[in-house]
Amino acid sequence: MAGQFEATVEIDRPVAEVFAFLADGRNDPKFSPRVQRIEKTGDGPTSVGTVYKSTVKDAGLTTRREFRITEFVPDQKIRWAEQSKNLVTAVEGGYDFEAVAGDRTRLRVYNVLEGHGLGKLIAGFALGAARKDAPNFADRIKKAVEAS
């Protein structure tokens, strides 16, 4: 079973600032308490092909994750795909950025979750939990960006 969760939030920062913050995946622990550690492989700025490797804790289980940037359009959108094979993975995800009045940014975040093997049995629960948390997740991003 695959399914998507998403949330939208307005952030009191210009698009370029919000994009720069989120383009550096090493900022993820600032808004995602499940991310225990994350590192970028390779040198240079984030671009298509950049890989981020992380250690996360979900439902008491610690797993390693690997995400590859698949699309990168400055100040407009970032897309990723999980390369690791865990029980439930984010096969696709992204951020959409939109400038709004007063140097604010409307941010949409989404992930498409999919279960693999035994993960097909729990994917629905994971998706339900992610959908329930989505507004709070977006709010944590907002607070982290505004605090940076």
Image (cartoon, grey):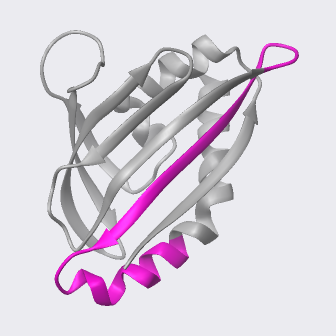
Q: Residue at x 48, y 73 (%)?
A: 127
The N terminus lies in quadrant: bottom left
Which residue in the rendered view is the most extreme toward the right?
A: 101
The image shows residue 115, relative to residue 14, as above or below, that is below
Q: Residue at x 36, y 29 (%)?
A: 71
Does the magenta run of residues contain 103? Answer: yes
Q: Residue at x 42, y 31 (%)?
A: 27
The image shows residue 34, relative to residue 146, as above or below, that is below
Quick check: 2 left or right of 20? left
Image quadrant in which you'd find residue 128: bottom right
Percent x, y for residue 140? Answer: 62, 45
The C terminus lies in quadrant: top right
Disc tally is 0
Does the magenta run of residues contain 136? Answer: no
Percent x, y for residue 83? Answer: 17, 50
Quick check: 30 left or right of 66? right
Q: Residue at x 12, y 19 (%)?
A: 42
Image quadrant in which you'd find residue 60: bottom left
Percent x, y for residue 143? Answer: 66, 36
Quick check: 13 left or right of 87? right
Residues in magenta, as a range: 100-129
